[in-house]
Image (spheres, helix red, strand yellow):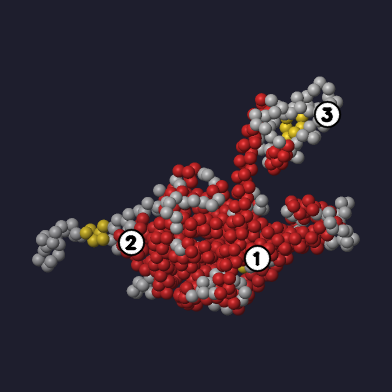
Amino acid sequence: MGGAALAVVVVVVFFLALYLLQRYGDLRKQQRMVLFGTLLSWYLCFLIVFILPLDVSTTIYRQCVLDSSNQPTIVPQARQTNLTEDGSSLYPSLSVPKVCKEPWSYIPDGVLPVFWRVVYWTSQFLTWLLLPFMQSYARSGAFSRVGKIKTALIENAVYYGTYLLIFISLLIYAAAHPQWKLTWKDLQTIGITAANTWGLFLLVLLLGYGLVEIPRSYWLSSSHGYLQAKTYFKAAKMVTEKAEAEENLEDVMGEVAVVHAAVRYNHSLRKCVDTILTKCPPEYQEEMGITVENSGVLPTKKALISLHKKVITAVQRHCQTGVQWSILLDQALYLEDVAKSQSSPVRHFVHSFPSAHGHSWIRRFIYTPTVEWYWECVLRQGVFRLLAVLLCLLSAAVVWSECTFFSTHPVLSLFAVFIQMAEKQYNYIYIEMACFITIFFLCVCVYSTVFRIRFFNYYYLVPHHQTDAYSLQFSGMLFCRLTPPLCLNFLGLIHMDSAISHQDRIQTSYTSIMGSMRLLSFISDGFYIYYPMLVLLLCFASFYNLGSRCLNLLGFHQYITDNDLTSDLVDEGKELIRRERRKRQKAEDGESRRWAWREQYGAQGTTGRGRAGYTDLEDNQNSPVTEIKKSDFPFNRRDVETAEQQRGLLQDHSSDEGSPNRRSTGGRYQSLSSSRTNIFDEV
């Protein structure tokens, strides 16, 4: 049963990682190695999180078996009435081993250590060696694989050289102290400790932000007014970013046009120029070289590589801002529809632009307009606020446990109390659920911050397939560095890590591959215990928006409710959304009129052509006079011209292929016969 549970978790986690990669990356256009590296790093990190509760329940069962074998339960054979004069029993007592119930998800011995060793070292190889190299490879503007590999090695020379310098310094320090007999296993432990220390330093920073921001975001999201104002604020910022991206793209395309005009088709660098042209948007490719004069200065290969890199970055940023603007526009229009529906007496949600939301079977049968109205106008606020309260209580429990998990007598960590209560009753279902909920909440607080954080334009995870290769791989690196210390911190919260709790008990299979942290006592007894207490200060800083206020002072505008600049940007965004609504409304009205004209005049034209046709051809082909038959109701010349102009606006979507005549793009009709005289040109 345990093997089946392990197999199910492995498959489910793989599809979860694949779904996230499909949401943020582009599976069809991005490089296969980039997708593979990102998918593998995400998959291994999520796998650790989902398998660790099974490891905890299996370890508790093994501890029960060990305790029962060392301290068997004494069961007397007879009642105390059968006693001798000296008080001893006539029947000796028997030592019966304590019965331990095997958990439903029990994993046989030897499976988890091998599993953790493969998962952990693969993730560490990805985060410290492979992914940094692939980042530089993906961002390189070289035109060949050898050139990209060379560029990646040069850019990572300092990165890898730092590792080598630390390793050599460690060997020299160990050689200078003969009392230290460091084995290969001890060196592994020191390396693991160093990696976990770096990850724990970053983990506490992200965790302190997520513990406050996630409950607060759900509480604030229950108010449609807050969401609407914040969407207006984002729209005002996005317009500026979109304009900057368009200007940057135009500047880069101007440089490409100059290079395109300078390098002739018989030049050796022409192949590189053609490669750059394939990365340009189609509208710029058509205009390339038309209005640019040849400067006569030939670019170098290094300049073309730099230009190639600039083109890739500019096009990617232009696409990102365009998609983000469309998403923000849809969100703003939807929130305005929600505000109108709340004040409407009709319990029926009305969309301003129904065509933009599609007509899927879910909206037709499940999420109907009535259900949507009840959810958005009645239920959503209460559900979100209840969820925010529950998350707030869970955050408070995490903060309390982070500050008190080092205390074992008495046990102050709430999560350790819950696990020990369930351990006494051997309720493995409760143990696994409590472990999963705790570690899942910790992962959501940390990973959601990774998905939200943005380092200018170098690292930014954008949904709807708009994330670039550099950001995808950087997120994989962060996940692989944050997950091991996160799991160790969780095991410390529930007192399953003897290096922190100092309890004499069986280690989990996950901590067994980490080695004994007591080799570096100043880290295991100092940094690992007292540094997580910093999360309390970070929570206070996040609660009062100190980070956002500092960024706002530096010129990076953040949404702060009591700020005048925020109010100005909200007003600007509201006006932008109002303008876009008018544009979209005009487009919708124009499309509706086209469909109306198409249905009316398309049907009339079909019936007219079927009954009488448009002209009667004489036997004499040289006669320029044509006879137009009268229709059922009279038309004067002006009506005919107006009708023809209105028909010319249509794109002839009606099927006229089977009719005896067809219309040209100018609104005239042409005969399907091979007539040498353009007899219908004047119609």
Amino acid on which disc 1 is placed: Thr
- Look at label 2 and name its amino acid: Ala
**At which x and y percent is residue 625?**
81, 28
Q: Position of residue 494 (x, y in %)?
A: 40, 66
User: Which residue is located at x 84 percent, y 61 percent?
Assistant: 299
Q: Which residue matches tag 3?
A: 624
Disc 3 secondary structure class: loop
Q: Quadrant of residue 384?
A: bottom left
> Residue at coordinates 49% horizontally, 71% vertically from top-left?
208
Q: Is residue 231 left or right of residue 95?
A: right
The residue sitting at 74% across, 52% down in the picture is: 283
Which quadrant holds residue 508?
bottom left
Residue 138 visible, this angle: no
Residue where numbered disc 2 is placed: 422
Where's residue 576, x and y in %?
A: 61, 62
Quarter of the image holding residue 75?
bottom left
Q: Nearer the viewer, residue 126 or 35?
A: 35
- Crowding at dot 2, Cα within 10 Å, few <14 / some 14-19 / many 20+, comes out as some
Q: Residue at x 75, y 33 (%)?
A: 669
Specify the label residue 538 is tagged with.
none
Quarter that holds the C terminus: top right
The residue that mark 1 highlights is 240
